[in-house]
Amino acid sequence: MRTLITGGLIARADGVFNADLLIEDERILELGERLHERAQPDGTQIVDVSGCVVVPGGIDAHTHVNLTVGGAHVSDGFEAGTLAAAWGGTTTIVEHPGFGPQGCGLPDQPAAYLEEAEGQCRVDYALHGVFRHVDETVLEQVPGLVAQGVPTLKAYTTYDGRLNDEGLLRAFAALKDAGGLLAVHCENHAITRFLGERLRREAPRDPRSHPQSRPAPCEAEAVDRILKLAETADAPVYVVHLSTAEGLARIREAQRAGRPVIAETCPQYLLLDESAYAESDGLKYVMAPPLRTAADRAALWEGLADGSISVAATDHCSFSLAQKRAAETVFDCPGGIPGVETRLPLLYSEGVLRGRLTLPRFVEVTATAPARIMGLTSKGRLEPGADADVTVIDPGDERLVRAGNLHQQTDFTPYEGMVVRGWPRHVWLRGEPIIFARRACGYTGQGRFVPRSL
Ligand SMILES: [Zn+2]
């Protein structure tokens, strides 16, 4: 199968130029200025994308499309979650499993998720691992998991499955030895407990109690400590969903000192702020870390533009508003928001079109850097030999974001009512169209597991 994508503006992390892009079977064969003038073999599909921007298929390095917490399951699952990803121009997700049962082995959750994902996905997928405790057995399981293509593991500094400092140090060291990378959710558990207990008595149903129980120092303290622990273990670290200017300042200091520190943020922390919790449906925005101030938003945009933040992922976790409303207090509310479908359009519209990100930087943070950092070696680049994962963005396509018009299986979107320009018109997954002329044309099970190596 051969496809010639002609007339578009090719956007790569290293620059932007007008060229045609030729796909053969699953790979990109060639980029060139006038490939359309050359005779192509019979059966070559020619797709004119004049006026559009051609980018590598998005890589969402942080999703929870299949999460269960305390008996509550997210409303999408692998099939619907990956279909929403496809609609949003994302061709690979890297899924974070939830905590397994207490005492479970390190490979258990990735194995369970692999089984559940099998035959269900509409885009390619990879998996992270997760620590819920650290002991000799778990540490001995690290190299095996890394060798099976799961080289990134997540640790939490809060929740029941949190690691203490000693556990974190041992996790850093074990992953470093095995050629892996520790991703850390940074919030100070004692602060959330101390403030949370007080607010649970004083204002248990006020959505504003949620951000008040996890204020900026809660993240900044944990970021600071994690950076020092990583330095002690002489290991690299990946900070997930960074939300504060203060945390970013600590990360910049470590990066300036030459430490291998990678930061990720998400559209919600760039586009929304804590005033949202005062809305009548403020429960929608219950997520951890919570939304911050306008000053934090501005700082994160700067960090994303200047390279101190490398990755824009989503932390997509689609508990419904109905599930959130059913909780007795805001502290019992399942946390998380949907976002896998809106990530690229939001970052294009609010980032590129508003001059906060250059087009190459947009490509870098949404595809090229996450592919490189996560070890998705054949993805995230428009160049010969790479997987033909290609998204064509139509910059003239302006839409009002409405939950009902999206394909995410949730009853809300945190971006309801926003006007967004630049939606995917076509999306190819390894050379096959999965969205064409804004119609879904892929199939369930088309997405493959991608083993990774760093
Ligand atoms: Zn997450």
Image (tube, rainbow, N blue to C red):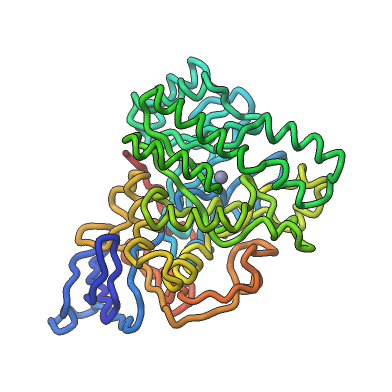
Residue at 33% x, 56% y is 380
Tell which quarter ligand 1 is in: top right
Residue 411 occupies which quadrant of the picture?
A: bottom right
Question: Extreme top residue here?
Answer: 136
Residue 392 in picture, x, y percent from top left: 37, 73
Given residues 15 and 438, the one toward you in this image is 15
The reply, left or right, for residue 57 in relation to residue 281 is left
The reply, left or right, for residue 113 in relation to residue 429 is right
Residue at 73% x, 46% y is 210
Given residues 352 and 409, the one toward you in this image is 352
Residue 45 in picture, x, y percent from top left: 28, 79
Residue 303 vertical placement versus 54 (above, below) = above
Viewer can see residue 214? yes
Residue 396 occupies which quadrant of the picture?
A: bottom left
Q: Report the label total.
A: 0
Residue at 30% x, 63% y is 388
Residue 317 vertical placement versus 344 (above, below) = above
Residue at 60% x, 73% y is 418
The reply, left or right, for residue 134 in relation to residue 125 is right
Q: Quadrant of the C terminus?
A: top left
Viewer can see residue 441? no
Given residues 134 and 12, the one toward you in this image is 12
The reply, left or right, for residue 8 in relation to residue 447 is left
Residue 99 in picture, x, y percent from top left: 60, 34
Q: Quadrant of the N terminus?
A: bottom left
Residue 159 in picture, x, y percent from top left: 65, 33
